Image (cartoon, rainbow, N blue to C red):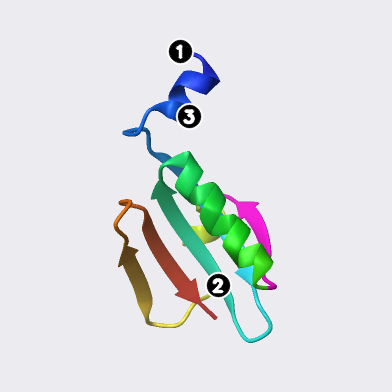
Amino acid sequence: MSEEKIMADENHVHHMFLHVESSDAICMLNIAGHPYRLRELIYMMVENGCRVMQTTAEAYQTFSFDKETVEVYDYLTSIIKAKFV
């Protein structure tokens, strides 16, 4: 299946881990959703002054974080799990 066909499939789900730094917080995100939605989410974070770097599942699992984990389910079925320093 071509890349273009996968990107156009509304049921396609992409998964990635991101390390995000802003002026007042550092977090690790475990995100899943349609590639267009993830691209939009990353663009919004960068536009709001965040530094965003793709990372690995291992880095996510070993990330030093507080006891609260946030889960967000939006109307486009993206799932975000965030661990904050």
Between 33 and 10, the one lying in front of the other is 10
- In the image, is 72 to the left or to the right of 23? left
Residue 74 lies within the magenta run:
no
Quadrant of the rendered image containing residue 81 = bottom left
Placement of the C terminus among the 4 image quadrants: bottom right
Give how far apart the Cα atoms at labels 1 and 3 are: 10 Å
Give how far apart the Cα atoms at labels 1 and 2 are: 34 Å
Magenta stretch bounds: 49-56
Residue at image coords 45%, 44%? 15
Q: In the image, residue 60 lies at what x, y percent?
A: 51, 59
Asked which secondary structure carries label 3, the reply is helix
- In the image, is 25 to the left or to the right of 49? left
Q: In the image, residue 37 lies at what x, y percent?
A: 46, 48
First along the sequence among labels 3 and 2:
3
- Tag of residue 83: none
- Tag of residue 27: 2
Give how far apart the Cα atoms at labels 3 and 2 are: 27 Å
Residue to which mark 1 is pinned: 1
Residue farthest toward the top in the current orientation of the protein: 1
Seen in the picture, residue 66 relative to 17 is either above or below; the reply is: below
Residue at image coords 31%, 33%? 11
Q: In the image, residue 80 lies at what x, y percent?
A: 40, 61
Q: Residues within 10 Å of mark 1 (few under 14, many from 20)?
A: few
Seen in the picture, residue 2 relative to 63 is either above or below; the reply is: above
